[in-house]
Image: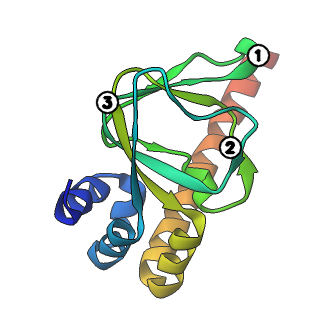
Amino acid sequence: MSIEDDVVLLDRVPTFHLLGNAAIRVLAIGSEQQEFASGSVLFRAGDAADCGYVVQRGAFRLSFPGGGREDIVAGPGALIGELALIVAMVRPATATAREYASVIRITRTLFQRVLDSEPDGARRLRDEFALRTSQAASDLMLVGGRLTD
């Protein structure tokens, strides 16, 4: 895929769209593409996470250890490992290619540089994360209230 194709794909990812076109172009230029055969592992649960991945082609199954959560399938345009772009963490799931697949790998270092160079986009992203956190907290309170009734 060309840089222009990558820019179009990254702009469809809500997290990156908030940053604006100039930031997306920097991400597209500074990222790397990786390809995976069917059954190949992108990462394993417990691995250190220093990047996020945007699925270009194919799909990955995310399996969570312990059976507490159902598997998730991430297809083209999905951002896998969003939180790893912001903070050091370990992967909560194993991602396995369901078919031939390719991804755009974006390192935390690159993402942080983009945030530093695009303060307006960084503020929009911060506001979006705050909104999501607030919504998640509200949802938990609702569920907790239902469990105690």
- Indicate which disc, 3 or 2, sits on the residue closer to the N terminus: 3
Number of residues whose C-alpha sits closer than 10 Å to that of mark 3, classed few (under 14), some (14–19) or many (20 or more): some
Residue 66: which numbered mark, if any? 1
Q: Hey, what amino acid is under mark 2?
A: Ala
Quarter in which the C terminus is drawn = top right
Q: Nearer the viewer, residue 122 or 44?
A: 44
Nearest the eye: 92 or 34: 34
Residue 24 picture location, percent across and down: 33, 69
Up the image or down, 136 lies above or below 145; here it is: below
SS class, disc 3: loop
Q: In the rendered structure, find residue 137 and report the number of the disc placed on it.
A: 2
**How far separated are the C-alphas under marks 3 and 1?**
26 Å
User: x and y percent of residue 109 in the render?
Assistant: 59, 71
**Residue 75 location, x and y as percent?**
35, 32
User: Circle 3 sits on which residue?
Assistant: 58
How far apart are the alpha carbons under marks 3 and 2?
Answer: 33 Å
On screen, 121 above or below 75? below
Which numbered tag is attached to residue 13? none
Which amino acid type is shown beneath numbered disc 1?
Gly
Residue at the far right in the pictured view:
148
